[in-house]
Image: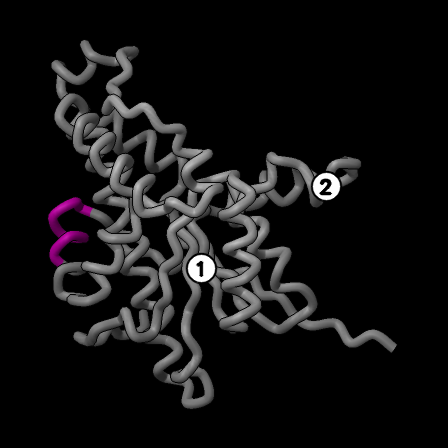
Amino acid sequence: MVEIFNINYNQYVDVVGTAHFTRRSINDAYESIKSLNPKDVAIELDWTRFQHLNTACIGCPKSGSCKGLCEFTGAAEALGNVDTNIWLIDMTEQEIRRRIRSRMTPSERTRMGFQVYYEVDEDPIWLWEKGFKDRVINNSKKQIEASRQFFPSVWRVLVDERNALMSARLAWIASKNLHIHTRKDSKILAFVGAAHVEGIKDLLMDPLLIKDQLRRFHLSFTEPTLIRRVAIQWN
């Protein structure tokens, strides 16, 4: 395991918040890839979800224009024919479900089936597409906090525990790059849901917090999944 240094990893990682399956998020992914030209791209997926999203469109006549395309697969497409690493940094869906089941309290189980809403009169998709990302993120935080009050164990898994694991994996990738002289100046571009951005940035700022969170949540660190894209030279 590569050593995770006690440094501020925000200088090595650009974390981009997204709203899944919106055209603006896909365009943001394209633009971020184009402007930064990263050698390492990390996305909030595990191998099963990545495989599903990347094979679902094979042979579909709407491929490339369908609204079902998400910014994570859009980012992978935007890389094109280049040498790059795609890192899958999220917890598996199977592990997420297992952790939620094991942590739910009896009172939370009785509330299952009820939806908790923070009342807003604004369509988050419309706001995001029009560029009001800060307003969407602020409303999302309030929604999360409202839900956290009713399902604290569920939200601890969905947000806090995943933040800890994804931050640890991002720090691991950055630390690995610091051991390679030619890569230390290359930033990692990470795409995650908007609700995760603030928590991940806070953890990357102080890696000791990452270690504390891993211990607190009884999370075993495993390396992120690497998908290596190699440029093809056409004759």
Mark 2 surroundings: few (<14), some (14-19) or many (≥20) residues within 10 A: few
Does residue 186 appear left or right of residue 68 in this picture?
A: left
The C terminus sits in image quarter: bottom right
Query: Residue 7 appears at what percent x and percent y?
Result: 20, 76
**Element under label 2?**
loop
Depth check, front residue: 7 or 97: 7
Does residue 20 appear left or right of residue 234 in this picture?
A: left
Residue closest to the far right:
235
Q: Is residue 162 above or below residue 10?
A: above
Q: Residue at x 69, y 72 (%)?
A: 231
What secondary structure prevails in the magenta region?
helix
The residue pinned by badge 2 equals 63
Query: Residue 127 appears at what percent x and percent y?
Result: 41, 38
Asked if residue 215 is among those painted magenta in the image, a careful observer would answer yes
The N terminus sits in image quarter: bottom left
The residue pinned by badge 1 equals 42
Q: Is residue 207 above or below residue 176?
A: above
Depth check, front residue: 221 or 42: 42
Q: Is residue 227 above or below residue 92?
A: below
Write the start and end of the magenta stretch as one range. Answer: 212-218
Amino acid type indicated by mark 2: Ser
